[in-house]
Amino acid sequence: MNRTGITLVGPGTPKGATMRVWVDRDGAITGAPMNAVTAKANGWFVGGMAALCVVAGFYAARAAMLLALDRRRYAQWDVEWDLVEPLCSERFRR
């Protein structure tokens, strides 16, 4: 489909020369579409970053779970030590 319009061109372009431009759905001039290599590279990059984020999320959730379990275990040890410590220290007071 041919269209006629005015656009900025590089120096030395003759007046009335045919130029290839890309337009969006509204008819406004836009940049050239991606070529196949760029599209494939972008796809691999986005896919790799998504996989990396999933792995990082898994390890962050695992670390948070281990921290919560450790805090709970330490609290239980504190309660048990409060019960046992008087018995242990009593043996050395003789």
Image (tube, helix red, strand yellow):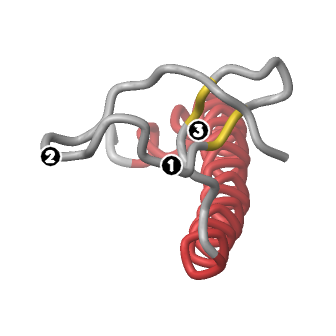
Are circles 2 and 1 on residues that touch, CB within 8 Å?
Answer: no
Quadrant of the image containing the C terminus: top left
Mark found first going from the N terminus, 1 or 3: 1
The residue that disc 2 covers is: 12
Q: Position of residue 69 (x, y in %)?
A: 72, 46
Mark found first going from the N terminus, 3 or 2: 2
The residue that disc 3 covers is: 81
Amino acid at pointer 2: Gly
Q: Secondary structure at mark 1?
A: loop
* Residue 47, placed above or below residue 57: below
Q: Position of residue 91 (x, y in %)?
A: 44, 48
| Number of on-image labels | 3
The residue that disc 1 covers is: 18
Are circles 3 and 2 on residues that touch, CB within 8 Å?
Answer: no
Q: Secondary structure at mark 2?
A: loop
Q: Residues within 10 Å of mark 2 (few under 14, many from 20)?
A: few
Q: Real-space Cα distance between discs 3 and 2? A: 88 Å
The one nearer the camera, 4 or 70, is 4
The one nearer the camera, 25 or 46, is 25
Q: Real-space Cα distance between discs 2 and 1? A: 13 Å
The one nearer the camera, 46 or 9, is 9
Mark found first going from the N terminus, 2 or 1: 2
